[in-house]
């Protein structure tokens, strides 16, 4: 087995998955535990309201009602040969011959970005056209173009709408300036309400929720509370509705560290982080993961914070890791692994038949690193250990930073409803992990965290009580070893 080869040398980067227990063949004991909350740590603080870290309330669009189509946030870095994603969005829009409009609005080079997407959609049988709606087109009057009847007619006749990556602020500023919807945006909503597809990669994914990160600083600074409405945070376009927060480049960039503080500040209970070269197909309450990597669901329904700590903290955040073919039901809070995972191995920590591979403890010095959280989740669900820990901190704070020594301790642990599934059917080992729990607490980490090494001096021998000592390194006296 692949993990047997590398063993304890690395935490393998795996492709995860997760199960809706009521609808799949899961052992009765595990099914009975599904409704139980995770075991709270003995030192868990009492429930307290989340600390307000945003200066004023974001203006959020009114929730849309009526029939909806498919919202497809793509985590960025979408490859041209990712057939699973490209074929899927074309299929959702009606297959070959489906009409698409492409917005390069967010891009630095909107013409080239939109042209590439048009070609990739047409390669899969769609009929696609780029629309000249972008701030980088200096010759375009944006106020007029978002009201142009001919362009609006093209949008309304489409079955799919695609937003390229770039700067998400540009999309919102053009289509919803000052929080006011434009005729162009209403036409896009018309496509969506009629059952069409609204897809976007990177910046095009960020706009999917009613609130988005607009120009966020480093993740550790977000955790330190350094974000505000109208600057790092802004309104999105809200295609996934008011109850789900969406973020992109998620596992690659460790963005769960910025998602949870914003969710607490804005009252979100559910967050969906989509990784690169991966899409999440959202239709009503159903989420399906498609593509090369994975997605993380963050559920804060039962999470608590301690306002007395005067810094960001959370206890009992529930995490589930999904990969290609896995589904998550937003209302039921349930995970359904793909069929191939259900044919594989079930990892039930409370089963008498549970035979975990990992036994050693792990402590991560970079919890916000590339795919660290998903790697640790897959490791923990196949481990004899009940928990894993790690830290995150700013190793290079700015001079004079009053919060330079503020770091965070992460505790990832199992609950009574934690389950995993894995398979080697496609070669490398792939995982789905449902219902692990995360606590994040502020800690002090002295900066700098290291200094020059200086061996301790050996204690001097007393001339009165000791015989003469031969020079160090001589045959009569072995060299003294440096003490740690």
Image (cartoon, rainbow, N blue to C red):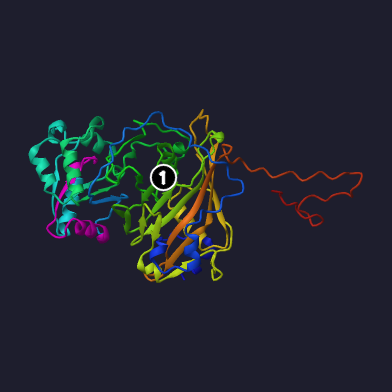
Q: Does residue 101 belong to the magenta stretch? A: yes
Classify residue 229 by image quadrant.
top left
Q: Nearer the viewer, residue 309 or 82?
A: 309
Position of residue 40 in the picture relative to residue 207 (left or right): right
Identify residue for label 1: 269
Q: Position of residue 308 (x, y in %)?
A: 56, 34
Secondary structure beneath dot 1 equals loop
> In the rendered view, would you say 47 is above or below 376?
above
> In the rendered view, would you say 123 is above or below 245?
below
Q: Nearer the viewer, residue 479 or 111?
A: 111
Q: Residue at x 71, y 49 (%)?
A: 482
Q: Residue at x 41, y 33 (%)?
A: 227
Q: Which residues are magenta?
A: 82-110
**Few, some or many residues within 10 Å of mark 1 (<14, 14–19, 20+):** some
Position of residue 316 in the picture relative to residue 81 (left or right): right
> In the rendered view, would you say 23 is above or below 454?
below
């Amino acid at each position: 087995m692949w993990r047997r080869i590398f063993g304890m040398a690395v935490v393998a980067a795996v492709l995860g998955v997760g199960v809706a227990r009521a609808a799949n063949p899961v052992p009765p004991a595990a099914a009975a535990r599904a409704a139980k909350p995770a075991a709270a740590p003995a030192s868990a603080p009492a429930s307290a309201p989340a600390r307000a870290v945003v200066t004023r309330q974001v203006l959020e669009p009114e929730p849309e009602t009526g029939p909806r189509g498919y919202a497809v946030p793509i985590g960025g870095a979408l490859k041209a040969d990712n057939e699973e994603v490209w074929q899927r969005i074309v299929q959702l829009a009606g297959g070959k011959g489906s009409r698409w409009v492409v917005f390069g609005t967010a891009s630095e080079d909107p013409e080239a970005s939109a042209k590439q997407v048009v070609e990739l959609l047409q390669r899969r049988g769609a009929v696609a056209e780029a629309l000249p709606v972008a701030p980088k087109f200096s010759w375009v009057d944006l106020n007029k173009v978002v009201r142009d009847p001919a362009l609006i007619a093209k949008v309304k006749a489409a079955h799919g709408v695609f937003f390229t990556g770039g700067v998400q602020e540009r999309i919102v500023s053009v289509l919803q300036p000052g929080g006011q919807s434009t005729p162009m945006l209403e036409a896009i909503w018309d496509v969506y309400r009629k059952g069409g597809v609204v897809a976007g990669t990177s910046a095009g994914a960020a706009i999917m929720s009613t609130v988005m990160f607009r120009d966020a600083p480093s993740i550790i600074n977000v955790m330190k509370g350094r974000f505000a409405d109208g600057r790092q945070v802004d309104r999105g376009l809200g295609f996934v509705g008011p109850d789900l927060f969406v973020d992109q480049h998620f596992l690659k960039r460790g963005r769960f560290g910025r998602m949870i503080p914003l969710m607490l500040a804005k009252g979100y209970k559910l967050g969906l982080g989509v990784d690169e070269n991966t899409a999440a197909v959202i239709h009503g309450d159903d989420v399906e993961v498609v593509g090369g990597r994975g997605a993380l669901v963050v559920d804060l329904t039962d999470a608590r914070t301690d306002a007395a700590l005067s810094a960001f903290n959370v206890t009992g955040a529930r995490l589930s890791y999904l990969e290609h073919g896995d589904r998550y039901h937003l209302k039921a809070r349930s995970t359904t692994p793909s069929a191939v995972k259900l044919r594989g191995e079930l990892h039930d920590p409370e089963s008498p038949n549970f035979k975990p591979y990992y036994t050693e403890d792990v402590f991560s010095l970079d919890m916000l690193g590339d795919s660290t959280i998903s790697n640790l989740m897959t490791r923990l669900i196949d481990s004899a250990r009940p928990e894993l820990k790690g830290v995150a901190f700013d190793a290079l704070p700015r001079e004079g930073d009053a919060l330079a020594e503020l770091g965070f301790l992460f505790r990832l642990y199992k609950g009574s409803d934690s389950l995993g599934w894995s398979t080697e059917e496609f070669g490398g080992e792939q995982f789905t992990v449902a219902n692990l729990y995360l606590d994040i607490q502020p800690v002090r980490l002295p900066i700098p965290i290291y200094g020059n090494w200086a061996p301790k001096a050996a204690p001097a021998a007393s001339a009165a009580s000791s015989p003469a000592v031969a020079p160090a390194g001589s045959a009569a006296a072995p060299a003294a070893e440096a003490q740690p």
